Image: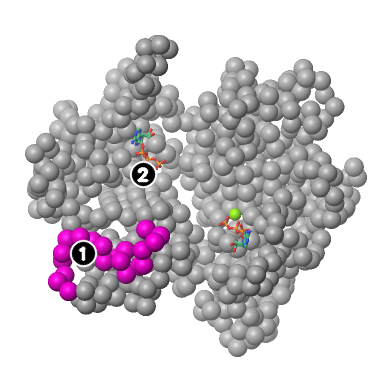
Amino acid sequence: MTEAAQVPTEAAGADLLLRAHDLKRYFDVSPPFLNRVIERLPRAIVKAVDGVSFDIGRGETFSLVGESGCGKSTVARLVVGLYQPTAGGITFDGIDVAGQTAAEARQNVQSRMQMIFQDPYASLNPRWRVANIVAEPIRARGLLPSNREVKARVGELLTQVGLSPADSEKYPHEFSGGQRQRISIARALAGSPDFLVCDEPTSALDVSVQAQILNLMKELQRQYHLTYLFISHDLAVVYHVSTTVGVMYLGRLVEWAPTQTLFNQPRHPYTRMLLDAIPDLEMTGRQRIPVAGEVPSPINPPSGCPFHPRCPHADDRCRAEMPTAHATGDSHVACHAVDDGRLS
Amino acid sequence: MTTAPANQPLLEIRNLRIEFPTRRGILVAVDDISLHIDPGEILGVVGESGAGKSLTGAAVIGLLEPPGRIADGQIILEGGRIDNLPYEEMRKIRGRRIGAIFQDPLTSLNPLYSVSRQLVETIQTHLPLSERQARARALELLQEVGIPGAEERIDHYPHQFSGGMRQRVVIALALCAEPRLIIADEPTTALDVSIQAQIISLLKRLCKDHQTAVMLVTHDMGVIAEAADRVAVMYSGRIAEVGPVQDVVRRAKHPYTHGLMGSIPHIGHAVAKLTQIEGSMPRLQEIPPGCPFNPRCPEADGRCRAERPELQWIENTEVACHRFDAPEARSQAGD
Ligand SMILES: Nc1ncnc2c1ncn2[C@@H]1O[C@H](COP(=O)(O)OP(=O)(O)OP(=O)(O)O)[C@@H](O)[C@H]1O
Ligand SMILES: Nc1ncnc2c1ncn2[C@@H]1O[C@H](COP(=O)(O)OP(=O)(O)OP(=O)(O)O)[C@@H](O)[C@H]1O
Ligand code: SF4
Ligand SMILES: [Mg+2]
Ligand SMILES: [Mg+2]
């Protein structure tokens, strides 16, 4: 099959909101030129994202999971325009927002996309009152004419995220971690976006606080028909929030499927391995199957299938040839063993 | 060194109280907690951020940072008090009888020294071994914690190892003198689930093989469910509930533990909404009288707001909750 076959098609109907097509982002992490010459060090390129395609339907939650360094945050940053892609395209509501001539289009849709980060403290200006933090996107785009209206809107937003209008006079340090994440969400909602990119939004929070934030995010999604690109390394959280899940490994999507399918019938050996590694509350005392090996360096990725050094099903073809994603049932899987029928 | 008689716990914490004197009065961060750990046992300590987990661990290894201080209580290791020892004596116990593993392996390793040098030095500090013997022991330890190709890698520097490998090196360092007790404070929090599983199964194996006891501090219930024999749930510097992991995880009795378990998403149980404990844990200066959980508790009544609940035995666990005081409440204990 061709590369184009990698684009999932289920969500591609009228409801398509965001499409990433064969996205790539490389980083040059070479030592300085002189060192390279003197110490004869080679150029080093990190292929942080290397050919990722996915579709997100309106009102859905598409999640990316995978081990540290597999490229999840880089995808998030590409989608919201914080990074330019090395290659590939992104369309938002049918508009090309990543091409060479897309700067203007990006401007126009920017207010419809917002990002929520992992560390709610680092992403809030400590010297600003909450009122100004939340009002910033409103003021920056001149969405409301008077200060009085801005203030009313800020009060409304704070109420929506479970804080009170009186909190607008306080500074970020006066809040707990969960409350700070609520402030980030209020700010993200200020410009009435329809698409939120959430990069590990609850990873720095206690589970009880995480539950509050996840409930809030789901409620807001239902109320405003929001679409989420959700990133987490916690598979149980992903199970809870997602419509569709994509599993990344070394800059590539190795499998994507509707949530229930992915968790009930994982196909890619890496997905199976990740699911086996989850500590399970239900099965106290169960011996987890420890995953062999660790993620290889993205600077010198293995030949063939990037997962082959850790894969119990690898054969010669896996060591030589990069698998492309094919549809099996409602999953898409990039694995030779699945293609060859060695693994169902 | 005395070996503990069979019926004596390896570690006993009695009525520990840790305070921070401040200009505006004394803050009580750990308030009258008692715990014990048996040889070969893994005791999990869970709770929200700020509950006092790390302070409790730090008090045991004698690494409380001033102005924090033990204001009351005793810490007893193999029958002898260690909370009132002079600094030098405590330093000897640390490393020799109690090992420590922290969240960030980089803070426990010196980036300028090779792994072999750090291991050999630590071994020689605690055991009367020659350089060659110590090096052989270091190699053995690296093999034991599962560093592949340990012979080639022993002279590498920490930055040449991946995160999971570094954490294994830290565990090897903690094991140098075959301590009886290991304090592991969030040892897997910075690691991916796949590596986490490797570290947890390593810890479990070490406990079994050497009868080492572990105090495993973490906020990750999954890790606890998998690794711990018993678990203590902390809230606002106190123990809310402590008991066998099966009982606490599956039949949580304290309303806080109950809420906590419900707030964790489970694969395979699709729910529209997670159980939500309203509000947040109070700051130290705002801990309410009575039960510290009372403002958030769906079961709280007048007594909860006035009187501090003490731990009491309910079936296999100890619970600090007034719900279990009255006989009519006791009949609901199984729900
Ligand atoms: N600005 C950059 N310059 C150089 N390399 C980068 C840059 N950003 C990311 N990388 C590299 O790209 C790879 C993917 O990083 P990314 O942050 O996307 O991973 P991630 O999946 O979000 O990981 P984590 O779970 O740890 O957040 C990593 O190897 C990272 O070191
Ligand atoms: N130097 C200090 N001065 C004042 N209070 C302190 C100091 N160090 C710690 N505390 C307080 O003691 C309490 C317990 O802290 P501790 O580090 O034991 O929490 P923890 O349960 O380990 O939390 P976490 O999960 O965030 O690591 C916290 O409320 C903390 O703010
Ligand atoms: S003592 Fe009262 S307030 Fe505290 S947990 Fe029990 S019922 Fe709730
Ligand atoms: Mg990331
Ligand atoms: Mg801590």
Q: Which mark is residue A272?
A: none
Distance CA(mark 1)–CA(mark 2): 35 Å
Residue A344: where, in percent of width, then height? 33, 34
Which label's residue is closer to the chain start, 1 or 2? 2
Q: Amino acid at mark 1?
A: Arg
Identify which residue is drawn at 32% across, 63% down: A133
Q: Is residue A127 magenta?
A: yes
Residue B2: where, in percent of width, then height? 91, 45
| Residue matched to label 2 | A65
| Residue matched to label 1 | A139
Magenta span covers which residues?
Answer: A124-146
Identify which residue is drawn at 78% across, 47% down: B39
Crowding at dot 1, Cα within 10 Å, few <14 / some 14-19 / many 20+, comes out as some
Q: Amino acid at mark 2?
A: Val
Residue A74: where, in percent of width, then height? 31, 40
Residue A247 figure quarter: top left
Q: Are marks 1 and 2 in contact (CB under 8 Å)?
A: no
